[in-house]
Amino acid sequence: MRLVRLHDGSRIQVRPVRPAAAPSLAAAWLHASPDSRRRRMHGTAGPLTGRDLAQLTGVDHLDHEAIVAVDPDQHEIIGVARYIRDSTTSAWSPRAR
């Protein structure tokens, strides 16, 4: 876990996603707007299922990396970043989404 000071002076904790983060991730998901949830999951706007949470938190930190930003005072997830490497190529290439 790393404490980071942002440009506005606020602080966040940045840490890798682990399976134990599933309840916090599910709570953060419910705070997102329905439109944001639909865009992120390509149509699913309801609560995350156990399968969804297992997939989102079961990262190997090599081909699939995910980190969370956590409010250190409220202990709530406020952001998630992830990448999944395409195993069919050895070179990185950006893709338009």
Image (spheres, rainbow, N blue to C red):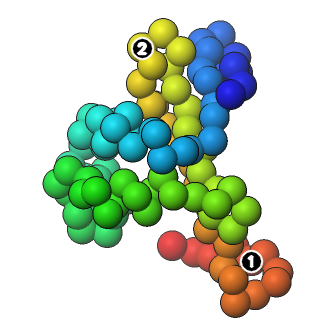
Q: Residue 58, image x and y in percent?
A: 51, 58
Secondary structure beneath dot 2 equals loop
The relative height of residue 60 versus residue 23 in the rendered view (above or below) is below
> Mark 1 sits on what residue?
93
Residue 97 seen in this snapshot: yes
Q: Residue 13, image x and y in percent?
A: 61, 24
Q: How many numbered dots are placed on residues in this image? A: 2
Q: Is residue 35 left or right of residue 2?
A: left
The relative height of residue 17 versus residue 58 in the rendered view (above or below) is above
> Mark 2 sits on what residue?
74
Q: Residue 74, image x and y in percent?
A: 42, 14
Q: Is residue 48 left or right of residue 88?
A: left
Residue furthest to the right in view is: 91
Residue furthest to the front in view is: 20
**Nearest the eye: 38 or 29:** 29
Kindly indicate the quadrant of the structure image that contains residue 90. bottom right
Instruction: Characterize the local packing of mark 1: few (<14), some (14-19) or many (20 or more) Cα atoms within 10 angstroms.
Output: few
